[in-house]
Amino acid sequence: QVQVVESGGGLVQPGGSLRLSCTASGSIFTFNVMGWYRQAPGKERDLVAEITTDGSTNYADSVKGRFTVSRDNDKDTVYLQMSGLKPEDTAVYYCKAETWDYAYWGQGTQVTVSS
């Protein structure tokens, strides 16, 4: 059974930093793409950043230059380093791990940016 587990959320002041981590396990297939999505109250779940096994990345325009996604392929772990956080970054952040045939989601971790 595949498990996707996030950690690292919390409360941070505007301009602060946080690092999220996500580890996927239990699949016999490679997690070709791992990434982060977020969902604010009353809004849809949107892509934040994603990364492939060869290191290719894709970012939402709203986080370019502030967030950095990286991964450790040996550990099937993806990270999201968030800097310059703004109140509008407040959301539940979800990790997604994709094999060739399925996408697995974590339970989500809350990030709140507030003074």
Image: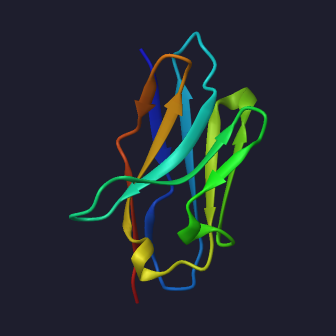
| Residue furthest out toward the top | 28
Q: Is residue 74 left or right of residue 13?
A: right
Could you tell me residue 28's position as x and y percent? 58, 9
| Residue in view at x 69 percent, y 72 percent | 65
Residue that extends furthest to the bottom in the rendered view of this protein: 115
Say left or right for 21 vs 57.
left
Q: Residue at x 31, y 64 (%)?
A: 40
- Residue 20 falls in image quadrant: bottom right
Q: Is residue 65 left or right of residue 36?
A: right
Closer-to-camera residue (3/57): 57
Front residue of this view, candidates 36 and 8: 36
Q: Identify whether 62 is placed above or below 103.
A: below
Question: Which residue is more in the foreground, 36 or 60?
Answer: 60
Q: How many marks?
A: 0
Q: Where does the image place residue 106, in percent across and percent down from the top left?
A: 40, 38
Q: Residue at x 57, y 48 (%)?
A: 21
Residue 22 left/right relative to 46:
right
Q: Which residue is at the far left?
A: 42
Residue 19 in the image, given as x and y percentages of width and height: 59, 60
Q: Indicate the quadrant where residue 61 lies.
A: bottom right
Image quarter where the N terminus lies is top left
The location of residue 57, given as percent across then percent down, is 70, 48
View extreme (right): residue: 54
- Position of the C terminus by quadrant: bottom left
The residue depicted at 56 percent of the width and 35 percent of the height is 23
- In the picture shown, does residue 88 fall above or below 104? below
